[in-house]
Amino acid sequence: MAKTFKYVILGGGVAAGYAAREFAKQGLKPGELAIISKEAVAPYERPALSKAYLFPESPARLPGFHVCVGSGGERLLPEWYNEKGIELILSTEIVKADLAAKSLTSAGGETFSYQILLIATGSTVIRLSDFGVQGADAKNIFYLREVDDADKLYEAIKAKKNGKAVVVGGGYIGLELSAVLRLNNLDVTMVYPEPWCMPRLFTSGIAAFYEGYYAKKGVNIIKGTVAVGFTANSDGEVKEVKLKDGRVLEADIVVVGVGGRPQTALFKGQVEEEKGGIKTDAFFKTSVPNVYAVGDVATFPLKLYNELRRVEHVDHSRKSAEQAAKAIKAAEEGKTVEEYDYLPYFYSRSFELSWQFYGDNVGDTVLFGDSSPESSKPKFGSYWIKDGKVVGAFLESGTPEENQAIAKVARVQPPVQDVDQLASEGLSFASKI
Ligand code: FDA
Ligand code: NAD
């Protein structure tokens, strides 16, 4: 017998938690909503895993960072779901989704049916074995996506005290993990193929600061090459990383962050896709009636740029989830909500650093402020200018007011007459808007 719910959220990550809160706010009867998650714990703020979860002193642990603390809200403990009559179906992986029959089947053979489905399956990591890298299944080669992964990495960090770590990838995971491994006093080397770190977002000028700062903190950086193989000792534990340029690095721990992939496989051929994600409208409704998709898996209309986009960051996962829950509840009353009008917002933190970015990173760029890695108080930023307007803004070490100012610039898109003047005005240009 299938368990039946009015609403099912498939996935138990950030979007699931924020959607549940919004459903509850809008009015929910006990037993109407279920969250089905392959993770063993209630929704939590995933960004903690690459930061405070791995700190050497007083690391963050659940229940400390369940949603919705990441955006300043009340923490939703498992008891909260209980009180609201929301069923948390944990440690349950869905292996088959039949959208026409409105039915989900778990690995354990249970079936679940729903009236409305919210797909919130997030991303999975790309593995080096996907590119056929030799020896990539050795012990102590880690990926980081879920709390289980973080627990295994934490154990290895403790077991390999003062050892050597190699971080493969120069993106978000690469930069955040290199920092936290260094804080744990490991000897850290980062390896990535591009000419500078985080090329998805950073300009060469921005990257030069972080590379210099990381070097000062003792992180070795090897650019322009990739890991092509690993050797292991007789216990099967990784010992060496072989690089394409012929170098060989010793390693007790390897952390890989070579990108994510949205988890859409369950729905292939059943729902329209676009740009690698599930295509939605401005209410996160998919091409299948009564099926919504939110968070990392959704390719949605980014109104500000008049373009369909997928965004793999936490702020959007929270807001898209809230938008979908509001739209679902409004539709039941024959009402509509306003279209999603998202301003992209990404951030990261490592060592004593903290940056925020708003808008679109396209067009020409200007760097402003003190971006010397040697500086005792570095503070700098960058604007992106397209068609004579500022469309994106980045700021390292901003105050809350300054971060608000750069968000406003990216939203308002003021015209720029003189790029040199913009560079010399720097942050004060944003503060005037
Ligand atoms: P999310 O990945 O959170 O949740 C998906 C859930 O679905 C998981 O619980 C998964 O187990 C479950 N699931 C998937 N398939 C299933 C199936 N078949 N059956 C059952 N359950 C299934 N962003 C940012 O802006 N700032 C930051 O600092 C960070 N930091 C950060 C650190 C780390 C380590 C990661 C991995 C990611 C970040 N991010 C981030 C990105 C951010 O966390 C991400 O965009 C959101 O978690 C996406 O939320 P979702 O709910 O879409 O997916
Ligand atoms: P990413 O896309 O940020 O970075 C991938 C990096 O992998 C590239 O920059 C490149 O340097 C490297 N790379 C690609 N192929 C390689 C190869 N063959 N060998 C070596 N390096 C290679 O992805 P990620 O850092 O793995 O992050 C995974 C997901 O988690 C993303 O969705 C990301 O947005 C999310 N995340 C976000 C944050 C944040 O927003 N602060 C933090 C952590 C994770």
Image (spheres, rainbow, N blue to C red):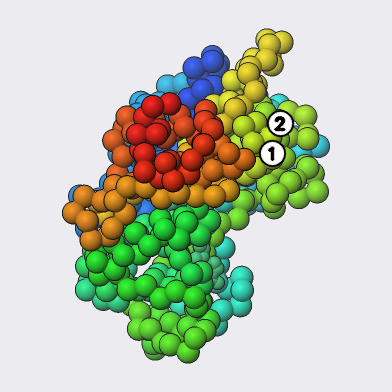
* Location of residue 130 (image quadrant): bottom right
Residue holding disc 2: 281
Label 2 CA crowd tier, 10 Å (few <14, some 14–19, many 20+)? some
Point out the image quarter for the C terminus: top left
* 416 is higher (above) or lower (below) than 115: below
Residue visible at 30% across and 76% down in the picture: 164
**Position of 290 compared to 415: left or right?**
right
Near-viewer residue (39 or 55): 55
Q: Earlier in the sequence, mark 2 or mark 1?
A: 2
Q: Amino acid at mark 2?
A: Asp
* Location of residue 190 (image quadrant): bottom left
Cα distance, mark 2 to mark 1? Answer: 11 Å
* 192 is higher (above) or lower (below) than 289: below
* Location of residue 46 (image quadrant): top left
Q: Position of residue 416 (x, y in %)?
A: 51, 36
Secondary structure under the numbered disc 2 in the rendered image: loop
Q: Can you tell which mark lies on residue 307? A: 1
Q: Position of residue 56 (x, y in %)?
A: 22, 58
Q: Tell me, yes or no, if residue 393 can be seen here.
A: yes
Q: Can you tell which mark lies on residue 11? A: none
